[in-house]
């Protein structure tokens, strides 16, 4: 066999080896997918990350939502019948859920990861309604599971949604003050509540004494 003939023969063998390897990988992949689709959910493990482990949504709430989406219990259901994207979307519709992630691990266990929204203040409106607010300015409902110890603001001017530009600016100032107070235990211990004045400024009510602190706006609040 000539040198050119040997080169062509070796090249053909190399190509054949790669084709066989590729075909084998495809067969294994198809087999793995088929096996996975024929497997069933063994159990569900739910992990909720929240504010200092004070959960406004608990594992039962999460499981109830997932069962409602799947029209029944999850255990022993074929994995191929799970629509994980729809389940994540259903969880994220809950006002207390910031993010949800679902996946099956190698043991056919449905892993559910839920990140809970973090309230930074409790706000009372002029009409007496009350809600929590997180750092994205999202309003959060009160909960019968837990009452958070947070800076309290009173006399927010409206319950109407969507908010005006002026009222949204006021919420931003509330966020600035809330986050600063929460990060300083001394101020958390000293301030009973913060009243919002008709001029959209802030009046601090200390826990000790009968004096009031006319704080003004939240501009330059750190100083």
Image (cartoon, grey):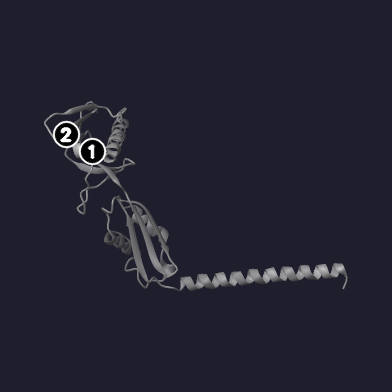
The residue drawn where x is 38% and y is 63% is 111
Badge 1 density bin: few <14, some 14–19, many ≥20, Cα 10 Å:
few
Q: What residue is shown with label 1?
A: 186
Badge 2 density bin: few <14, some 14–19, many ≥20, Cα 10 Å:
some
Give SS at disc 2.
Answer: strand
The residue drawn where x is 13% and y is 35% is 208
Mark sitting on residue 6: none
**Quadrant of image for the N terminus:** bottom right
Residue sitting farthest toward the left: 210
* Residues marked 1 and 2 touching at CB (< 8 Å): no
Where residue 53 sits, quadrant-wise, is bottom left
Give SS at disc 1.
Answer: helix
Residue 84 in picture, x, y percent from top left = 41, 61
Residue 65 in picture, x, y percent from top left = 31, 60
Q: Answer left or right for 12 relative to 203.
A: right
Nearest the viewer among 4 and 137 is 4
Residue 81 in picture, x, y percent from top left = 42, 68
Residue 166 in picture, x, y percent from top left = 30, 30
Q: Can the viewer see residue 19 in this picture? A: yes
Q: Is residue 122 above or below residue 2?
A: above
Mark nearest the camera among 1 and 2 is: 1
Q: Answer left or right for 132 relative to 79.
A: left
**Spatial CA span between label 1 and label 2:** 12 Å
Mark sitting on residue 206: 2
Q: Is residue 28 above or below residue 86?
A: below
Nearest the viewer among 151 and 76 is 151
Q: Can the viewer see residue 161 in this picture? A: no
The residue drawn where x is 19% and y is 53% is 144
Where residue 105 sits, quadrant-wise, is bottom left
Q: Earlier in the sequence, mark 1 or mark 2?
A: 1
Residue sitting farthest toward the front: 186
Where residue 57 sits, quadrant-wise, is bottom left
């Amino acid at each position: 066999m000539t040198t050119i003939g040997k080169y062509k023969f070796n090249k053909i063998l190399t190509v054949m080896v790669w084709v066989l390897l590729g075909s084998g990988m495809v067969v294994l992949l198809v087999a793995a997918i088929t096996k996975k689709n024929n497997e069933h959910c063994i159990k569900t493990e739910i992990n909720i990350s929240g504010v200092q482990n004070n959960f406004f949504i608990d594992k039962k709430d999460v499981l109830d939502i997932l069962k409602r989406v799947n029209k029944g219990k999850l255990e022993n259901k074929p994995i191929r019948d799970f629509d994980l994207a729809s389940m994540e979307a259903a969880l994220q519709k809950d006002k207390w859920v910031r993010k949800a992630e679902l996946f099956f691990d190698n043991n056919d266990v449905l892993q559910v990861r839920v990140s809970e929204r973090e309230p930074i203040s409790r706000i009372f409106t002029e009409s007496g309604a009350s809600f929590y607010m997180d750092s994205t300015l999202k309003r959060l409902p009160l909960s019968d599971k837990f009452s958070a110890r947070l800076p309290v603001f009173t006399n927010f001017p409206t319950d109407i949604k969507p908010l005006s530009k002026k009222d949204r600016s006021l919420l931003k100032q509330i966020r600035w003050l809330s986050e600063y107070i929460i990060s300083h235990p001394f101020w958390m211990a000293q301030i009973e509540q913060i009243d919002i004045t008709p001029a959209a400024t802030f009046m601090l009510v200390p826990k000790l004494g009968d004096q009031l602190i006319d704080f003004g706006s939240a501009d330059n609040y750190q100083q």
